[in-house]
């Protein structure tokens, strides 16, 4: 299991939304973000949902391949959207800000998904990705069939853990790549366009 000792760290806990807002402010300017696409939030809900509901922006959208939690009517909601084919559903440069939190580790072609996130974003893409320990595996790499992850996969096979995006793919595509400081297992990356 990766522990990313070579990556710079960033402290995400206990308030990851504050860190992401700082990234947005630094690399896009919060006042320059007029639209958001949240990719893959499903039933977990949009990351930092209350903040984005209050934000003075003209467009809010969320999509997932399986299902999406009920949203306020201001949100555009699409199901059946594969992150590996975002440009089939959204025009290039459709959103100022695109976020994809804890999704890519479930996607077969993570590089293609990263490329697609960048296609539909105008200004900034932020991703996070959790490792095996967050998905029902122990330190030896054995899967616990009684874990919450196993129950989740039984309902939605798209939730199966595959692996995190590769650091080299992220860097090749122009992402700044960090790892969460505490356990050094969760990737946090962003690309300013």
Image (tube, rainbow, N blue to C red):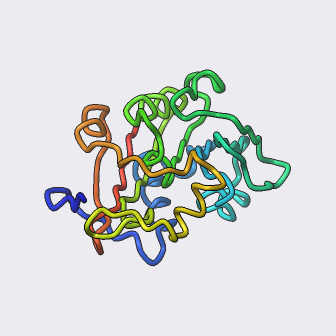
Which residue is nearer to you in this view: 138 or 66? 138
Residue 102 in the image: state x and y as whole percent.
48, 55
| Residue at the image position 28 percent from the left and 42 percent from the top | 166
- Asked whether the viewer can see residue 157, the reply is yes
Residue 185 in the image: state x and y as whole percent.
30, 63
Which image quarter: residue 188? bottom left
Query: Image check: 77 left or right of 189?
Result: right
Which image quarter: residue 85? top right
Quadrant assignment for the C terminus:
top left
Query: Image check: 13 left or right of 53?
Result: left
Query: Image check: 136 left or right of 154?
Result: left
Query: Image check: 81 left or right of 19?
Result: right
Quadrant assignment for the N terminus:
bottom left
Q: Residue furthest bottom?
A: 14
| Residue at the image position 67 percent from the left and 60 percent from the top | 49
Q: Residue furthest left?
A: 6
Q: Residue furthest front?
A: 145
Residue 41 in the image: state x and y as whole percent.
61, 52
- Asked whether the viewer can see residue 34, the reply is no
Residue 76 in the image: state x and y as whole percent.
77, 41
In this view, 139 is above or below 116: below
Numbered disc total:
0
| Residue at the image position 61 percent from the left and 29 percent from the top | 94
Which residue is nearer to you in this view: 84 or 155? 155
| Residue at the image position 64 percent from the left and 39 percent from the top | 65
């Amino acid at each position: 299991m990766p522990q990313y000792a070579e990556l710079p760290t960033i402290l995400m806990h206990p308030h990851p939304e504050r860190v992401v807002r700082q990234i947005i402010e630094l690399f896009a300017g919060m006042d320059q973000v007029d639209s958001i696409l949240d990719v893959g939030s499903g039933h977990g809900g949009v990351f930092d949902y209350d903040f984005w509901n209050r934000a003075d922006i003209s467009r809010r959208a969320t999509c997932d391949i399986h299902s999406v939690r009920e949203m306020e009517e201001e949100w555009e909601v699409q199901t059946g959207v594969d992150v590996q084919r975002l440009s089939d559903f959204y025009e290039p440069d459709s959103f100022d800000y695109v976020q994809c939190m804890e999704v890519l580790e479930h996607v077969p072609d993570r590089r293609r998904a990263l490329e697609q996130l960048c296609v539909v974003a105008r200004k900034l893409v932020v991703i996070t990705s959790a490792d095996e320990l967050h998905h029902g595996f122990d330190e030896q790499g054995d899967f616990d069939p009684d874990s919450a992850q196993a129950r989740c996969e039984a309902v939605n096979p798209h939730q199966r853990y595959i692996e995190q995006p590769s650091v080299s793919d992220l860097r090749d595509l122009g992402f700044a790549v960090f790892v969460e400081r505490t356990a050094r297992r969760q990737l946090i990356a962003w690309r300013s366009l």
